[in-house]
Amino acid sequence: MIENSQPKPETVRPHAPKTTHISLITKPRLILRAVLGALGLITIYSLLTLDTGNLNFLDAFQSLGLNLKAMFLQPSVGQDSWPLLLRALATSVSLAMLTTLLGALIAFFIAVFSARNLVPDGLADTIKAVMAFIRSIPTILWVLIYSVVMGLGANAAVVGLTFHSVAYLVKAYSESIEETSQDTIEALKASGVGFWPIVFQAILPSIIPALLSWTFIRFEINFANAVAVGAAAGADDIGYYLFMASGFYFNFHEVGLIVYLLIAVAIVLEVVSMRLRGHYLKNN
């Protein structure tokens, strides 16, 4: 018996690289580095050529420290009284509440017709495009636009804030509606259930927690916007008195008091939002 003496072929295995770190410089990374480098150079050039106007930075920081101390450590009522500030604060809260409720009511019905699982894609895309255009313009600009048409006052603030709230909530509500299973909707349609019964009896109960969350988020945004546009629209809310205390009277003690009032309201709104949402989830 003759044995096969031919050598067995050797298997050549590729050698792993000595280092496991492979640097890949892709085009997006290269563009990002170029943009960051350009921004860094522009920043350095701006700092070197900045006209300080003979500003003494030491005195400026000392003045800043005194102003912050007056605001946050020594808050007090200035030219305005406690009842006046509390009434103005209540006006801001009422303005935020009214615009949020109106915006939520209008936005829900528009969101129904912008959800892809309920209406044709063309209609949904058209509505979403219009809402995106409205959202792209800041709220204060809408308030100023309506101030030109309606005059300064609370009416322009209400319409402007509501207009932007609708565009914001339509996007949030439509995305929540689209999370509903398409199979469930099709099964209900096959059973002969109408459009609005599907919306109010099948979709709405399942998305109420999401709607509450988005609505309270917009409520907090509207409260901040109401403070910001108070002076611009002449709504006589807390924003107007904040502007007068900071930019007209230069009374930083009153500015600090108003800031603390705003922080307190924001905390209360957050607590109420969490309690309501938790109460609904517990009962359902």
Image (spheres, helix red, strand yellow):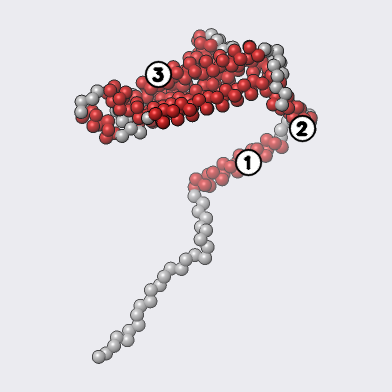
Q: Which amino acid does label 1 sit on?
A: Gly
Outermost bottom residue: 1
Residue 73 appears at what percent x and percent y?
71, 26
Q: Which of marks 3 and 1 is in front?
A: 3
User: Viewer-proximal residue, 180 or 228?
Assistant: 180
Is residue 177 visible in the rendered image? The answer is no
Q: How crowded is mark 1: few (under 14 residues within 10 Å), some or many (20 or more)?
A: few
Q: In which quarter of the image is residue 65?
A: top right
Whole-percent x and y of residue 83? 63, 12
Question: Which residue is denoted by mark 3 in the rendering?
Answer: 106
**Mark 3 or mark 1, which has the lower sequence index?**
1
User: Looking at the picture, does residue 74 appear above or below residue 81?
Assistant: below
Residue plotted at (36% across, 21% down): 109
Residue 80, given in percent of the width and then of the height, sits at 68, 12
Tell me if residue 151 comes above or below residue 116 in the rendering.
above
Nearer the observer: mark 2 or 3; the answer is: 3
Q: Do labels 2 and 1 touch, CB within 8 Å?
A: no
Instruction: Name the image quarter holding the N terminus.
Output: bottom left
Give the residue at x 60% y 41%: 38
Q: Which sits in the foreground, 148 or 228?
A: 228
SS category of the residue bearing label 2: helix
214, above or below 156, in the image:
below
Residue on which disc 1 sits: 40
Identify which residue, 254 or 106, lies in the foreground.
254
The quarter in which the C terminus is drawn is top left
Looking at the picture, tell me which residue is in the foreground, 43 or 61.
61
Residue denoted by label 2: 57
Return the disc, 2 or 3, that comes first in the chain's sequence. 2
